[in-house]
C-alpha cells in the first residue's frame, strides 16, 4: 500500500469535503485523477499531503519516510502552472535588466540546494549539511533521467515550455518523493514535447508511484491503470481506467476539433509568403514587425522576422515549443526591452519613439497563463475584471457605475456572477482564466492578444469561453492574435494562421496578407 483513505472526511474552512471517502493506492497501480474545473482535484491533492484537517476516518501512508521526515512531506505535488510563478519575476526582470544570458538565473543555480529547499544560505545548519549528500544524489539521478545535462549552464529565461517542464520535474525529484502528484503535466506542450515527456514519465513510473491530475480524458497516459473521478469535492468513481471511462458520457468530456477542412483558413508556412484570397480590401495596419531579431546570449529565439497584421484580421500563431510565439507576443504588448532595438510598429507608431506604454496598453486586451500571477491578496473576481478598464493589477482606484455594470454583465456571460465577490485566488485555475477573458474584453480593445487562453479549461468551460469570445468578435471589429497548441482551443473566428518553426538562427519569413 502506498496511501489509503478509510471513511476519511476533511475540513475546508467551515465546509466538509470528500466526506467518508475510502480509496487505496497499491504499488502495482498507477492512478489518474479526472474532473472538471472546480471539482476539487487540487484540494484532493492537498488532502493527501496533509494540507487539509482530517475530521473523520483515517489517512495512512504505506512507506517509510527517510531522515525522520513526516510521511506527508514525501508526497510531492507538482503543478507546472504554479511553478512558473517561481521563475516568472526572474524572467521579467531579466528581460528588462539585461539581454545577456550570463546575467540571468542559470538552470544549475535554479537547482541549487538552498534554492530548491528554500534555505537561506546564511542559515544553513549541520542538519542541513547532513541532508545535502542525499539531495545531490537525487538531483544527479533526476538530471540524468530527464536529459538535462546540456541545459545546466543555460538561463531559465531561454528554456522552451517543454524544457521548462523537464526542469520543474527534476526540481520535484530532488525531494525524497514516495508519491509524485502531477497536476496537468502536459499543459502548454506541443505534440513532440508531450510525447517526450510522456516517455520520460513512463520510465519514472516504473519505480515511483504517480498520481496524474487532468481535466481531459485524452491526457491520461496510456500506462495509467486506474482512475478517480471527482465532482463537487466528492469521489464519484474509483476503479480500473476502462471501467471509469466507459461510464463517462462522451458529451461530458470529449471535444471535437474546431479547425476543420471546410473552414476558410489561409495557412502561412515559414519561408513562403501567403497571398490575399479574393477581393477583400486590406485594412489599416495594426502591427508591423520588420526584420526583427531577438536573442539571449548565444541563444537566438527569432531571426530576421517580418509580419504585418491588419485591422479586423483573426490570426492563430502556431508552432512548437521554443519557436518564439510568446516572445513575439511580449514584443506586441511591450513586455520585452529588445523591441527598442528592433523596428516594431503598433497602431502605426514605432515603439521607442516617445509613445506612452499606457497609451498602447489601453488599446490591447491581453490574456495569458502568467497574468494571474499578478493578482494576490483579497482582490475579488469582480475587481479583477474591473481592473481591465485601467490596465492595472489589483483593485481599481475608482469604478463608475456604468463600468461596474459592464463588468458584472461579462461575469454573467461567462457564468461567474456567483463568484463576483469571492477572492480571485479562491477560484479554480479554470475559473480564473475565464475572469481574465472578461478583464480583457470589458474595454472593447481594438487588438486582442491571447496566449493559450484555454489552457487548463475542461470542455464545458472551454465551450463557454470560446462561444463568448466568438460572439464578441462577431459584433466588434477586433484584431486577434491567438496562440494555441490544440485545435479545439482556437475560436472559430480565426481565419489566418502564422506557423513558426523552431529555427534558432535560421531565417523565418512569414507572409503578410497584403
Image (spheres, rainbow, N blue to C red):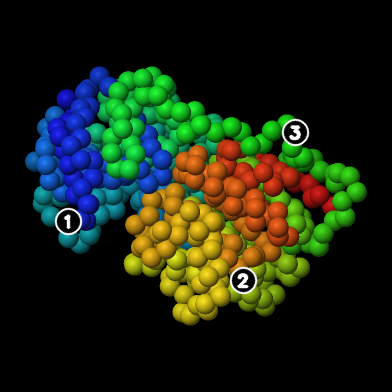
Marks 1 and 3: CB-CB under 8 Å? no
Label 3, label 2: how many angstroms apart (C-alpha)? 36 Å
Q: Which mark is residue 113?
A: none
Taking the image as drawn, is residue 293 in sight? no
Q: Is residue 437 left or right of residue 35?
A: right
| Residue for point 61% across, 52% down | 469
Element type where label 2 sits in the image? loop
Query: Is 444 on the left or on the right of 188, as rendered?
Result: right
Residue 210: quadrant of the picture: top left
Location of residue 114 with respect to 146 vertically, above or below: below
How far is the residue under mark 2 from the one under mark 1?
48 Å
Q: Residue at label 3?
A: 262
**Going 10% across and 51% down the picture, which residue do you hit?**
126
Q: Which residue is label 1 attached to? A: 124
The residue that mark 2 highlights is 362
Distance, label 1 to label 3, CA atoms, is 63 Å
Q: Position of residue 98 (x, y in %)?
A: 51, 63
Amino acid at each position: 500500500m502506498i496511501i489509503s483513505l478509510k471513511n476519511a472526511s476533511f475540513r475546508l474552512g467551515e465546509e466538509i469535503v470528500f466526506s467518508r471517502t475510502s480509496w487505496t493506492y497499491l504499488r502495482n497501480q498507477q492512478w489518474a485523477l479526472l474532473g472538471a474545473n472546480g471539482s476539487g482535484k487540487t484540494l484532493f491533492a492537498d488532502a493527501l499531503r496533509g494540507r487539509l484537517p482530517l475530521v473523520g476516518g483515517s489517512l495512512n501512508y504505506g512507506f517509510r519516510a527517510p531522515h525522520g521526515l513526516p510521511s506527508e512531506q514525501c508526497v510531492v505535488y507538482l503543478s507546472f502552472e504554479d511553478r512558473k510563478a517561481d521563475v516568472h519575476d526572474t524572467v521579467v526582470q531579466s528581460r528588462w535588466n539585461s539581454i545577456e544570458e550570463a546575467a540571468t538565473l542559470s538552470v544549475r543555480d535554479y537547482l541549487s540546494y538552498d534554492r530548491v529547499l528554500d534555505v537561506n544560505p546564511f542559515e544553513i545548519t549541520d542538519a542541513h549539511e547532513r541532508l545535502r549528500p542525499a539531495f545531490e544524489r537525487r538531483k544527479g539521478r533526476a538530471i540524468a533521467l530527464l536529459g538535462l545535462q546540456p541545459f545546466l549552464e543555460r538561463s531559465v529565461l531561454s528554456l522552451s515550455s517543454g524544457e521548462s517542464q523537464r526542469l520543474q520535474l527534476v526540481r520535484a525529484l530532488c525531494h525524497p518523493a514516495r508519491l509524485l502528484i502531477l497536476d496537468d503535466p502536459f499543459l502548454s506542450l506541443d505534440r513532440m514535447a508531450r510525447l517526450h515527456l510522456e516517455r520520460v514519465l513512463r520510465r519514472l513510473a516504473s519505480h515511483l508511484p504517480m498520481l496524474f491530475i487532468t481535466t481531459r480524458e485524452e491526457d491520461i497516459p496510456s500506462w495509467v491503470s486506474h482512475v478517480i473521478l471527482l465532482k463537487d469535492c466528492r469521489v464519484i468513481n474509483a476503479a480500473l481506467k476502462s471501467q471509469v471511462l466507459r461510464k463517462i458520457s462522451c458529451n461530458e468530456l470529449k471535444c471535437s476539433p474546431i479547425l476543420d477542412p471546410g473552414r476558410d483558413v489561409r495557412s502561412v508556412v515559414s519561408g513562403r509568403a501567403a497571398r490575399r484570397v479574393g477581393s477583400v480590401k486590406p485594412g489599416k495596419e495594426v502591427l508591423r514587425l520588420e526584420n526583427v531579431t531577438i536573442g539571449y546570449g548565444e541563444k537566438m529565439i527569432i531571426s530576421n522576422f517580418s509580419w504585418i497584421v491588419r485591422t479586423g484580421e483573426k490570426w492563430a500563431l502556431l508552432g512548437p515549443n521554443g519557436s518564439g510565439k510568446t516572445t513575439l507576443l511580449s514584443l506586441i504588448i511591450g513586455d520585452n526591452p529588445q523591441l527598442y532595438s528592433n523596428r516594431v510598429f503598433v497602431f502605426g507608431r514605432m515603439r521607442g519613439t516617445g509613445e506612452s506604454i499606457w497609451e498602447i496598453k489601453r488599446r490591447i486586451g491581453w490574456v495569458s497563463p502568467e497574468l494571474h500571477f499578478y493578482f494576490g491578496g483579497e482582490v475579488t473576481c469582480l475587481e479583477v475584471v474591473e481592473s481591465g478598464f485601467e490596465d492595472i493589477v489589483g483593485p481599481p482606484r475608482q469604478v463608475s457605475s456604468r463600468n461596474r455594470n459592464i463588468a458584472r454583465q461579462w461575469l454573467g456571460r461567462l457564468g461567474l456572477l456567483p463568484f463576483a465577490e469571492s477572492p480571485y485566488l479562491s477560484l479554480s485555475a479554470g475559473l480564473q482564466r475565464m475572469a481574465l477573458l472578461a478583464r480583457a474584453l470589458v474595454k472593447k480593445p481594438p487588438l486582442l492578444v491571447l496566449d493559450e487562453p484555454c489552457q487548463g479549461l475542461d470542455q464545458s468551460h472551454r465551450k463557454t469561453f470560446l462561444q463568448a469570445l466568438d460572439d464578441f468578435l462577431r459584433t466588434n471589429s477586433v484584431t486577434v492574435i491567438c496562440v494555441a497548441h490544440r485545435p479545439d482551443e482556437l475560436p472559430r473566428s480565426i481565419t489566418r494562421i502564422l506557423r513558426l518553426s523552431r529555427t534558432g538562427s535560421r531565417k523565418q519569413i512569414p507572409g503578410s496578407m497584403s
